[in-house]
């Protein structure tokens, strides 16, 4: 959430910057008037309360002096003020909610360093690592991860559809172990670098989803669980949601930065994704991800963005997977983010790079929604922290990348060295021939 005072003081600049997100944010011009009306209602209410308190004392004195007529006039004035105080209270609350809803639907200000553009075609690749394999030179045509999985039944898409529906998949055998091994390697790697592992709830309440910015704007992208007896829940779209809310409403006592890593299932409705990535495990309604979350001082957050992004990149490098880093444009950057780097891994089946991680600096946008603060010293005034998050990595897409980039001509899969101790083998054997 943006600071309403900052928006009012820099109204033209704020609207101009937000409009580079390929939207129309001119509705913010209503904000100063709404705030003025709200402040006027509160002032009138407080003035009436002060008058009522003063009049109550005067009434007692007038009655003692037998000035009954004057006392009755004041009583009438006090009585009339009650309705006006209640009306002002009601108006102030209504305006507070209108202001809140306006700010809740408004995204974060894009950082000036972002490429300006209306969509992802304006994103800028800023780094490449590794060289994609030349399968042609090796004398064979690489298979897609779904074909590799279908060959021996290690991906069962049909039964996934039968049991749950489209975009659900059963993993079996060594493919299931590969998924588990990738996640274990990622968690061990991040914890060895100072991240504290945390296992979060997979269902959260509405306030939690609102805190990180998923609600109200992205309601149609999430799974809602309306349980009449237990309460109102949402399946998490990412561990960012529960982990960033960990300190909601608190002053962080730990020394900053605080860095968490979390493994979780993620659930996304993928509304609007019809026809996209319909084959394989790239776009699923349920998938696993290792998430990185950082709480930092404001002046350190962009350095922390580089630290977090490098942490995710290091997983790809350790696994020997070619990737590129992309700086998202103003029209593509996420709702809560001021700046975001996407990491895209090379997938031979697409003959292109595919997103495997998004690393974002959300500045104080989420912290203001959640009231997460810190103190620079014991007696200092609390300040909002800056929050950051990124995938370290999306596990299913890592599995797909390993399968495709490490396949052999006979259909076997060489296991990247860091995963071998988790897998208990060096190679996933070629499918058995009929």
Image (cartoon, rainbow, N blue to C red):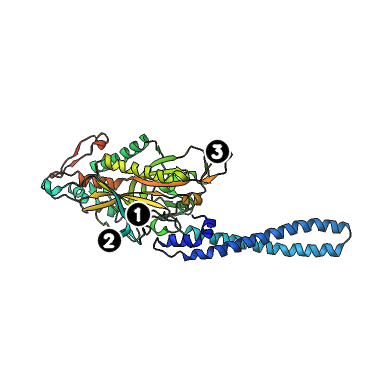
Q: Which residue is labeled 1 in the image?
A: 328
Q: Which residue is labeled 2 in the image?
A: 275
Q: Which residue is labeled 3 in the image?
A: 377
In space, the residues marked 3 and 2 are separated at their CA atoms by 54 Å
Residue 98, by quadrant, is bottom right
In space, the residues marked 1 and 3 are separated at their CA atoms by 36 Å
Q: Position of residue 301 (x, y in %)?
A: 43, 45
- Mark 1: secondary structure: loop
State whether residue 316 is above or below residue 54: above
Q: Position of residue 80 (x, y in %)?
A: 73, 65
Frontmost of labels 2 and 1 is 1
Mark 2, other Cα within 10 Å: few <14 / some 14–19 / many ≥20: few
Q: Position of residue 228 (x, y in %)?
A: 48, 54
Q: Tags 3 and 2 in contact by the CB under 8 Å rule? A: no
Query: Which callout, 2 or 1, points at the residue further toward the start of the chain?
Result: 2
Q: Tags 2 and 1 in contact by the CB under 8 Å rule? A: no
At 28% across and 54% down in the image, what residue appears?
Answer: 161
Frontmost of labels 3 and 2 is 3
At 78% across and 59% down in the image, what residue appears?
Answer: 55
Q: Is residue 381 left or right of residue 258?
A: right
């Amino acid at each position: 959430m943006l600071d309403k005072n900052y928006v009012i003081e820099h109204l033209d600049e704020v609207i101009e910057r937000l409009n580079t997100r390929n939207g129309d944010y001119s509705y913010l011009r209503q904000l100063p008037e709404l705030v003025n009306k709200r402040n006027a209602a509160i002032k009138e209410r407080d003035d009436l309360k002060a008058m009522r308190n003063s009049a109550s004392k005067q009434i007692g004195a007038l009655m003692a002096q037998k000035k009954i007529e004057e006392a009755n006039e004041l009583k009438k004035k006090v009585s009339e003020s009650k309705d006006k105080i209640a009306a002002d209270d009601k108006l102030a609350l209504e305006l507070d909610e209108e202001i809140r809803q306006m700010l809740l639907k408004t995204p974060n200000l894009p950082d000036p360093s972002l490429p300006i553009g209306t969509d992802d075609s304006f994103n800028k690749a800023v780094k490449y690592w590794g060289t994609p394999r030349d399968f042609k030179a090796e004398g064979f045509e690489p298979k897609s991860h779904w074909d590799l999985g279908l060959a021996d039944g290690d991906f069962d898409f049909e039964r996934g559809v039968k049991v749950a529906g489209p975009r659900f998949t059963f993993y079996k055998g060594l493919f299931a172990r590969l998924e588990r091994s990738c996640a274990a390697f990622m968690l061990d790697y991040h914890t060895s670098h100072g991240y504290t592992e945390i296992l979060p709830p997979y269902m959260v309440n509405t306030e939690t989803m609102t805190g990180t910015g998923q609600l109200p704007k992205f309601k149609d992208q999430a799974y809602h669980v309306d349980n009449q007896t237990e309460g109102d829940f949402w399946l998490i779209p990412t561990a960012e949601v529960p982990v960033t809310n960990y300190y909601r409403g608190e002053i962080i006592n730990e020394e900053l930065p605080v860095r968490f890593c979390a493994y979780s299932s993620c659930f996304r409705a993928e509304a609007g994704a019809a026809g996209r990535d319909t084959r394989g495990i790239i776009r699923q309604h349920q998938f696993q991800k290792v998430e990185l979350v950082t709480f930092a001082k404001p002046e350190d957050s962009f350095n922390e963005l580089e630290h977090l992004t490098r942490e995710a990149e290091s997983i790809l490098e350790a696994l020997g997977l070619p990737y590129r880093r992309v700086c998202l444009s103003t029209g593509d950057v996420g709702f809560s983010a001021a700046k975001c780097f996407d990491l895209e891994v090379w997938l031979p089946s697409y003959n292109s790079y595919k997103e495997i991680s998004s690393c974002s600096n959300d500045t104080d946008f989420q912290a203001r929604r959640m009231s997460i603060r810190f103190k620079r010293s014991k007696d200092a005034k609390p300040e909002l922290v800056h929050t950051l998050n990124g995938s370290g990595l999306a596990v299913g897409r890592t599995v797909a990348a390993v399968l495709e980039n490490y396949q052999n001509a006979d259909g076997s899969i060489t296991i990247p060295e860091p995963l071998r101790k988790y897998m208990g083998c060096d190679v996933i054997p070629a499918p058995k021939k009929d």
